Image: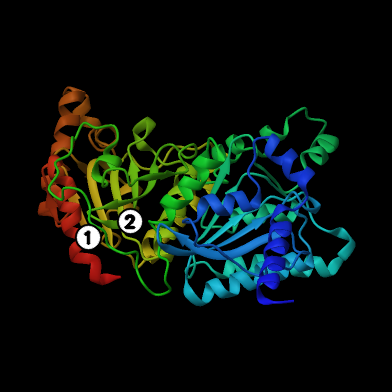
Amino acid sequence: MDHAQRMQKLSEQQAALRQGDEAAVAAHRAAGKLTARDRVSQLLDAGTFVEMEAYATQGHVVTGYGLINSRPAYVIAQDVTQQGGAISLAQARKISKTLTLAQTSGAPVILMPDSKGMLVQEGAELLAAYAQVLGELAGLRGTCPVITLLAGEAVGIAAHFVQVADIAIAVDGGSLVAPFAPSVMRAVHGDKLTDAQLGGAEALATKGVVALRADSEAQGLALVRALVDLLPTTMGERVPLLAGDDLNRLISADSGELARDIADAGTSVELYANWGNACRTYLARVGGYACGIVSCAGAEGGRLDVFSCDKVAKLVQLCSDYNLPVITLVDSEGLALPGPEGQAWLMTASTRMLMAYARTLSPKVAVMTGNAVGPAYVAFAGKGMADISFAWPGAYIAPLTAEATVQTLEAERLQQQDRATLVREASETADAFAAAKAGLVDNVIDPAETRKHIIAALELLWAKG
């Protein structure tokens, strides 16, 4: 057999492997879903994918590396069209090899689970393989960003593929994540809930299980590409600084989208949008710097409940793991008032949030745009937390709201004077200028110039990381 014949045979073998089970692939695509190879092909820059162990037919998982927006990344995509994508010893070995290589470089790992379960015939040995893979994924935190894109099933032990990721995305209509199969849940509890209600994309997003929800696989893949641009791709190096839009661009202080206005145009990705709505959290670029943004100006005075505290802690921990600056826009009256049974839970969650801020060595910039009351000032903008803190002229910084201050400390004057007058006095004695005189904030700034002050602070603090 000459060289040309060998190459022809190689080409035929590759085509056969990539074609897989024709009937299963056809049925999968007829259901409007992409195959594992489709997902990898559409995710990576054209012509850059290098498949690892391409001829290892037993694993039923596509692994390899390539480029996303010219930046390196590793991919792992289970192939549900072959044996239901069941995880096996062979599959675990391929995944483990990929994770080991990723750890040596620090490049992101894009995990795309899609499996009907595990190859139970392999017994307890397979459980050990599962433990090894999940342990390796957990061990990547802070070294290699892990992004999970879920457009199929991750049930049972595989559900952990979502939670061990730094950021998880679920696609509407095809995602299912559950520690127990929905059929089991219905059999035990007699509920009539659908699969989607138990573990679909909407349910996962509203419970904070996934950070992002996509309308389609195409949108999910686009979100992965956007996230890779905001995370490091080389061990020990920061996210590259890119040219931002106008560094001196003024913003509207009345904008309901303050975080997006501060960010460079088109760069912001909101995480956990359907969960913990007293705060909003983003990854974005500001003046070309990749960073996290926490914006507390939600409903009911921006009071932080358990879910909001956990949501903020998640973002700050992500920024800490990958050395991203944290920008916090503060307008919060403090903690939400829980029921008696919820106080311990709220205390735990708020402490977790505070500790996330306290422990991160990443640059931290706070802007008090309105209220910074009690725990909100302590966690977000306190001198022991933020490296640099600004306040708008109308900001209010105090242990209690102005109304609560009057009610608590001015009971005698309330009997003789108008409540509104006393509240106004309390507000003025704890405004931004009073806080600045006391050294509680670094500067009082024009709201329209907030973006430019933040960028200047990031430039000053860049060497900190």
User: Is there CB contact under 8 Å for labels 1 and 2?
Assistant: yes
Q: Nearer the viewer, residue 223 or 129?
A: 223
| Horizontal and vertical percent position of residue 199 | 67, 39
Most distant residue in the right direction = 121
Q: Nearer the viewer, residue 401 or 272?
A: 272
Going by the numbered disc 2, the residue's amino acid type is Cys
Work out which quarter of the rendered image holds the C terminus and state it: bottom left
Image side of residue 450 versus residue 260, left or right: left
Tell me which residue sits at (15%, 51%) in the image: 247
| Horizontal and vertical percent position of residue 385 | 30, 60
Residue 440 visible in rendering: no
Few, some or many C-alpha atoms within 10 Å of disc 2 (few <14, some 14-19, many ≥20)? many
Which residue in the structure is indicated by mark 2? 291
Question: Which of pointers 1 and 2 lies earlier in the amino acid sequence?
Answer: 2
Going by the numbered disc 1, the residue's amino acid type is Leu
Tell me which residue sits at (19%, 24%) in the image: 420
Which residue in the structure is indicated by mark 1? 458
| Horizontal and vertical percent position of residue 261 | 25, 40
Tell me which residue sits at (50%, 59%) in the image: 47
192, above or below 62, in the image: above
| Horizontal and vertical percent position of residue 397 | 22, 45
Residue 177 image-quadrant placement:
top right
Image side of residue 362 versus residue 389, left or right: right
Q: How is the protein colored in the picture?
A: rainbow
Few, some or many C-alpha atoms within 10 Å of disc 1 (few <14, some 14-19, many ≥20)? many
Residue 124 image-quadrant placement:
bottom right
